Image: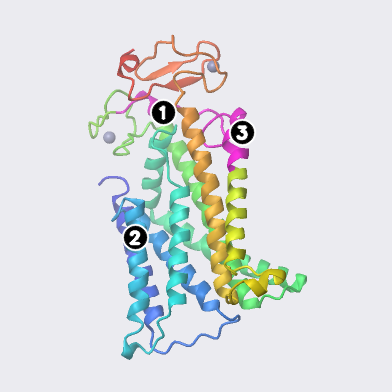
Amino acid sequence: MQPGARGTLWWRALAWLVLSIVFTATHWPNLQLDLPMRGSDKVLHAVAFMMLALVWWPTGFVRSVPLFALAAASWSILDEALQALPFVHRHAGVEDAVANLCGIAIATLVIVALQQDPRAPGHAVRTLAWRMVIDRPQAWMACAASSALGAMAGGVILVTAQSLLRQPIKPMHSALIGATLGVAVALHATIVVMMRSMEARLRAQRCCPACGAPGADGPACAACGAAVPGSSWVVPIARTLGGVPDRHWLRVGLVPVGIAGIVLVLVMAASIALSIRRIEALQPYLGPEVDPGMRLVLDAVALAMAASAGLWWSRRAARRIREKEAIECMACGHDLRGVVPESGIGRCSECAEPFRIPIEDPVRREG
Ligand SMILES: [Zn+2]
Ligand SMILES: [Zn+2]
């Protein structure tokens, strides 16, 4: 069985499970929630459809981001429209549909921001590590356990913090936000730890990037026959930002933060103009008040837009720097155009840093 095949099946089962939970919750006849804040149900709508989109994307049923976003948006509108059926005794509202769309917008921005560059160093090993991690039941159990702990810790921390600060947020609301943040942090930490140890194992055993069989040391894998370029095992240069050396921190780190800041300011200005954020002095000229839950959802979309724009810019800058990998040494900047590579990998004649020859450069690739 190919690595990742079993993991994908489990993932699809999870996606269908989440879909049926969301569908049941949105169509439960006469559901009455005792909500802590006016418009809190908008937050629940947005969170539900964001989670739904985030678990459906990795199923791989739809691989194009715009098509996926379109399908998810259509589903969310259909879900809201079905609530208008008389026997469901629910209320279909335009505001609920907007909250659903906001949740899907946030999920889409997350997906765009986290998209991997297949040319990035270590991408083949990372992809294989992910497929092998999700194949293991222990990994799913570790994620479930850490999510539960994260939800409890995050909920307790935020409820305590807001009671100390005497903020006018209801405890139930801060518990919900704290739990969501706690799950995100705990899941991220668990996945990072599992991926690191799996990547280290795959590199040590030289596992074939296609089938995962160990000892694929040569031009082709003995188990599945897939071509195994020597560059699969080049350990990427010491890096903290986007797989490029730290000396590019301005292009890959600071400029994207500035871009994110500009996007946030623009979105906030638009949100004041549309009367979503209120400024008392301007209120006589602006529209009616938006309810607090809806405002929270729209603010979350604004933050996601800013963060996603910054990450997208950073990844693009890193990709442009890496395009020069075989021209200029990533570590010391030495000119590499005269260096003759061996089976797709060259070494800088100044500092011995390995570099890969792009696939589009067959002349030097033959070396
Ligand atoms: Zn293989
Ligand atoms: Zn060098």
Ligand 1 lies under 8 Å from the Cβ of mark 1: no
Which residue is tagged 1? Answer: 233
The span shown in magenta is 228-256
Q: From the image, state whether disc 2 or disc 1 is nearer to you.
A: 2
Q: Quadrant of the C terminus?
A: top left
Q: Nearer the viewer, residue 271 or 34?
A: 271
For the point 43% across and 46% down, the residue is 115
Disc 2 to disc 1, C-alpha distance: 38 Å
Q: Is residue 244 magenta?
A: yes
Q: What is the secondary structure assignment of the residue under circle 1? A: helix
> Taking the image as drawn, is residue 14 in sight?
no
Residue 312 in the magenta stretch? The answer is no
Q: Are marks 2 and 3 in contact (CB under 8 Å)?
A: no
Tell me the crowding category of disc 1: few under 14, some 14 to 19, or many 20 or more residues within 10 angstroms, Cα based.
some
Q: How is the image coloured?
A: rainbow
Dot 1 amino acid type: Trp
Other-residue count near label 3 (Cα within 10 Å), few / some / many at <14 / 14–19 / ≥20: some
Identify which residue, 157 or 271, lies in the foreground: 271
> What residue type is disc 2 on?
Leu
- Between 323 and 288, the one lying in front of the other is 288
Element assignment for label 3: helix
Mark seen at residue 249: 3
Q: CA distance from mark 3 to mark 1?
A: 25 Å
Residue type pointed to by label 3: Trp
Residue farthest to the top, as pictured:
338
Q: Label 2: which residue?
A: 70
